[in-house]
Amino acid sequence: MALCSSAAQITVRWTMPVNNADGTPLIDLGGAKIYYGLESNNYTMVKDAGNTNQYTISNLVDGVIYYINGTAYNTAGLESDFTTEISKKASLPIPTSKPAQLKRLKEPPES
């Protein structure tokens, strides 16, 4: 079975660390990296999410389960250990429809 790319996506969110592994304040946070793949603990793709707490992985195959993990990195490029792995099923985004334009109310007939 060949997998083909579609417009499916997964959005992940996290809390950025405030301390280094040794407990000292983290003053040089560079950002986060998202690792993902089709098997648990086997991440074949990586995205640099930058210094944010949310990232949408796009161009995934609809209905396929992806295994996702993440790291934080500092401005020198040193990465943390992985966080806890999650698995999510990719899905097509909900289409955004144009809001319907309401018709003007008719004036009530004069009596």
Image (cartoon, grey):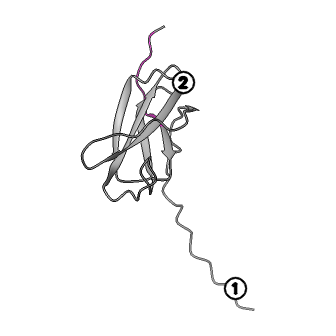
Q: Nearer the viewer, residue 86 or 83?
A: 83
* Res 64 label: 2
Residue 76 located left or right of residue 99: left
Amino acid tagged 2: Val
- Magenta-drawn stretch, dominant element (helix, strand or loop): loop
Residue found at the very far right of the displayed protein: 111
Q: Quick check: 39 above or below 96?
A: above
Q: Nearer the viewer, mark 1 or mark 2?
A: 2
Residue 62 located left or right of residue 110: left
Q: Nearer the viewer, residue 86 or 74?
A: 74
Q: Is residue 5 magenta?
A: yes
Magenta region, residue range:
2-9
- The residue depicted at 55 percent of the width and 36 percent of the height is 84
Residue found at the very far top of the displayed protein: 1
Cα distance in 3D space between marks 1 and 2: 58 Å
Query: Residue 105: x and y, percent?
Result: 61, 77
Query: Residue 40: x and y, percent?
Result: 53, 22
- The residue depicted at 46 percent of the width and 35 percent of the height is 82
Q: Nearer the viewer, residue 80 or 53?
A: 80
- The residue depicted at 50 percent of the width and 38 percent of the height is 83
Q: Mark 2 or mark 1, which is nearer the start of the sequence?
A: 2
* Quarter of image, res 64: top right
Q: Do callouts 1 and 2 mark residues in contact (Cβ within 8 Å)?
A: no
Amino acid tagged 1: Pro
Residue topped by disc 1: 109
Query: Residue 97: x and y, percent?
Result: 50, 52
